[in-house]
Image (cartoon, rainbow, N blue to C red):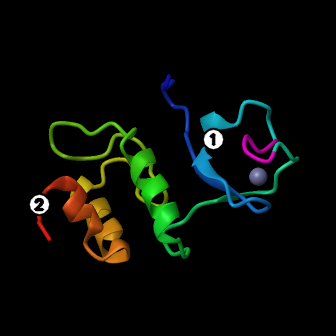
Amino acid sequence: MIHLVGDKDERMSCTGCRWIGAETEITIPGFCPKCQKAGNFNLLHCDMRFTQKELKILWTLFGDVPINDQDEIEEDFLDFTKGTDRFDVWHWFDARTHGVVNALLGLTTF
Ligand SMILES: [Zn+2]
């Protein structure tokens, strides 16, 4: 994925099919890449409710966010702004995935 300087890569969802992805995945402006309909897109926010499946997709998307050597994110992600400690984002995921993120990271074992 190409990240242009100053390009805001928002995470959004389609209100029709509940597709979740990055703005850069929308190849035809205004059209959902999954259901191909003229989409009504929602920007994603931290206080929205997500299913476990959606959180997994978001976790994958978060994997594309560059991290600097101070463990800070280098791009905005949801409501987390550039410079946020990556562990704050992990905690956000962890609180919603019942420790699944820690397990994914190998920090805990079941
Ligand atoms: Zn859609």
Q: Residue at x 41, y 58 (%)?
A: 80
Count neighbours of disc 1 (C-alpha within 10 A) and say few if under 14, some if 14 to 19, many if 20 or more: some
Report which residue position mark 1 lands on: 23
Q: Main secondary structure of the magenta part?
A: loop
Q: Quadrant of residue 33?
A: top right
Report which residue position mark 2 lands on: 107
Q: Residue at x 55, y 74 (%)?
A: 48
Q: Is residue 26 above or below residue 105?
A: above
Disc 1 marks a residue whose amino acid type is Glu
Q: Quadrant of residue 64?
A: top left
At mark 2, the secondary structure is: loop
Q: Position of residue 55 (x, y in %)?
A: 45, 63
Instruction: Please identify the quadrant where the C terminus is shown.
Output: bottom left
Q: Which residues are magenta?
A: 31-35
Distance from mark 2 CB to nearest ligand 1 atom below 8 Å: no
Q: Position of residue 45 (x, y in %)?
A: 54, 65
Q: Residue at x 75, y 59 (%)?
A: 17
Q: Position of residue 77 (x, y in %)?
A: 45, 52
**Is residue 78 rendered magenta in the image?**
no
Most extreme residue toward the front, as rendered?
A: 110
Q: Nearer the viewer, residue 82 or 78?
A: 78
